[in-house]
Image (cartoon, coloured by chain):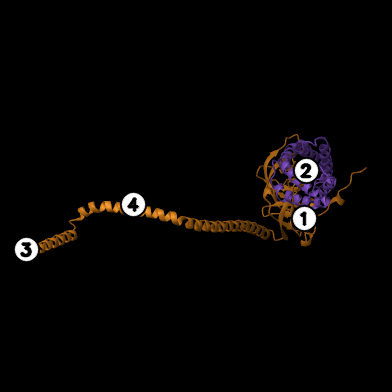
Chain colours: A orange, B purple
């Protein structure tokens, strides 16, 4: 009887303590205590989980590595393809820009008819300044036809086959072009050289030539049409006691970077050799 | 077969020279792949078709180039003659023979071309041509001389295998 009562009192007290703890917990009064008690437990849990993750990575990494390497290879192939496409598109863009400039040039000079050609090589010898083009007599091209770009005069065709041709640049040592100077209207002869530099020769002493004067073809001699832009005078040389002055000319065309040229097909070069009197014996 | 091989091999070299190497000058000189190939071929021990190769090379370059026709051919023939002479003199050190042949061969070809251009009244300063074209060309040719010698040595061994001693 006594033990039953004692047991009942113990149960009631335990229940009251638990209810009290719950009420205190719900009220937030046990927070500091739980914080202190749970801290070590959380640290232990974290340590355990980290170790588990490490072991899991070690077990799974070969599969992940293989998958990553495969994906890397696929992406590298894609990148190479895209880079090749970019290079191709850049090349097309450059060609489009050049052709657009040539079309504009053709519109400005409607009196001429043009055929566009591509440069496919240069003369194998460094002593000759020639380029080789990819069209020939099959496309209506003939020897002597002048060659230009959107910037200005390039040269003329000196040799032709059915499918290709050779263009002598005005920078060739053997080239000579009859020109006039826009400022002073003086006539002169433009010559090339081994180094590719252009020189104006036979400028009359009375001519008022200055740096910056534009040099255009004069049309004399019948080899080139008149008024094609050639370049600009950079320096003038000559003593008063000389017969003629000379001048250096900066060409308007970049001869180291020729890609597409225009051939003037409706210009007929004139052979004036029969008109030149032969010296008396 | 060795003689006929001259046409495609030298034609490819002319194309590479025209399309690629002529756009990579040193000062104003460029590599002459055809000349270096002819010299490398001429210096091979069992080769007897060097003159034929020189004629084919000279004709091909002469056709493509605007230089006076025959100038390049004459230059190549002289250079190959020099190489054959060196082969007999320096046969124990073929690499040295190749370098010497390239040096003097380039000078010879360039001198012949300069002379031909002056004969046709092309205004050309001799010393300017030597300083700005010939000497840089010599240097560029020397750079490719050894690799070309090795290539043509393999070609010669393939076309003219060494006879087995019985």
**Comparing labels 4 and 1, the label whose residue is closer to the camera:** 4
Report helix, strand or loop for mark 1: strand
State the CA–CA distance, disc 3 to disc 4: 52 Å
Q: Secondary structure at mark 4?
A: helix
What residue would you read off at disc 2? Answer: B40
Residue assigned mark 4: A47
Q: Which residue is mark 3?
A: A2
Q: Which residue is mark 1?
A: A165
Q: Secondary structure at mark 3?
A: helix
Query: In x, y percent, where is residue B88?
Result: 83, 37
Which of marks 3 and 1 precedes in the sequence?
3
Residue shown at 67%/58% (left/top)? A102
- Which numbered mark, 2 or 1, is in the foreground of this view? 2
Picture residue at 43% right of the left edge, 55% below the top: A57
Judge whether residue B125 can be spotted in this image.
Answer: no
Q: Of tags 1 and 3, which is closer to the observer?
A: 3
The C terminus of chain A lies in quadrant: top right
Do tags 4 and 2 sit on the same chain? Answer: no
Work out whether mark 4 precedes mark 1 in sequence or the reverse, and give the earlier one. Answer: 4
Q: What is the chain letter for disc 4?
A: A
What separation in Å lies between label 3 and label 2 (alpha carbons)?
A: 124 Å
Camera-side mark, 4 or 2: 4
Marks 3 and 4 on same chain: yes
To the question of a shared chain for discs 3 and 2, the answer is no
Sequence-wise first label, 3 or 4:
3
Q: How far apart in space, not on screen, are marks 4 and 1 (Cα)? A: 81 Å
Q: How many marks?
A: 4
Residue A255 x %, y %:
69, 48
Q: In which quadrant will I find the N terminus of chain A?
A: bottom left
Q: Are marks 4 and 1 on the same chain?
A: yes
Disc 1 residue crowd, few under 14, some 14–19, many 20+, Cα 10 Å: many
> Mark 2 falls within which chain?
B
């Amino acid at each position: 009887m006594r033990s039953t009562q004692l047991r009942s009192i113990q149960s009631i007290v335990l229940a009251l303590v638990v209810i009290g703890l719950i009420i205190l917990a719900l009220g937030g009064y046990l927070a500091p205590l739980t914080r202190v008690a749970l801290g070590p437990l959380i640290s232990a849990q974290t340590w355990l989980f980290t170790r588990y993750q490490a072991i899991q990575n070690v077990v799974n990494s070969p599969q992940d590595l293989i998958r990553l390497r495969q994906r890397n290879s696929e992406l590298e192939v894609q990148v190479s393809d895209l880079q090749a496409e970019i290079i191709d598109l850049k090349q097309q863009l450059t060609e489009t820009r050049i052709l657009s400039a040539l079309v504009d040039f053709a519109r400005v000079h409607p009196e001429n008819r043009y055929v566009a050609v591509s440069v496919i090589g240069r003369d194998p010898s460094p002593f000759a300044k020639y380029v080789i083009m990819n069209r020939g007599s099959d496309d209506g091209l003939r020897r002597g036809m002048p060659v230009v770009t959107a910037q200005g005069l390039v040269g003329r065709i000196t040799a032709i086959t059915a499918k290709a041709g050779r263009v002598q640049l005005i920078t060739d040592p053997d080239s000579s072009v009859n020109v006039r100077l826009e400022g002073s209207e003086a006539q002169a002869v433009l010559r090339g050289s081994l180094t590719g530099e252009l020189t104006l020769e036979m400028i009359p002493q009375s001519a008022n030539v200055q740096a910056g004067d534009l040099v255009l073809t004069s049309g004399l001699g019948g080899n080139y049409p008149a008024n094609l832009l050639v370049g600009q005078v950079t320096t003038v040389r000559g003593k008063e006691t000389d017969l003629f002055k000379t001048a250096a000319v900066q060409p308007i065309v970049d001869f180291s970077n020729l890609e597409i040229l225009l051939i003037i097909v409706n210009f007929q070069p004139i052979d004036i050799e029969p008109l030149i009197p032969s010296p008396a014996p | 077969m060795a003689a006929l091989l001259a046409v495609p091999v030298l034609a490819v070299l002319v194309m590479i020279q025209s399309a690629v190497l002529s756009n990579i000058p040193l000062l104003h000189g460029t590599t002459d792949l055809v000349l270096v190939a002819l010299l490398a071929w001429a210096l091979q021990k069992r080769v007897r078709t060097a003159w034929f190769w020189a004629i084919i090379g000279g004709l091909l370059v002469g056709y493509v180039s605007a230089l006076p026709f025959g100038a390049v051919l004459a230059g190549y023939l002289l250079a190959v003659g020099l190489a054959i002479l060196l082969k007999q003199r320096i046969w124990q050190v073929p690499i040295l023979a190749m370098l010497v042949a390239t040096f003097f061969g380039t000078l010879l070809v360039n001198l012949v071309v300069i002379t031909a251009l002056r004969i046709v009244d092309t205004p050309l300063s001799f010393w300017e041509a030597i300083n700005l074209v010939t000497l840089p060309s010599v240097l560029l040719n020397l750079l490719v001389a050894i690799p070309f010698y090795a290539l043509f040595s393999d070609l010669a061994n393939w076309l003219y295998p060494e006879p087995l001693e019985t």
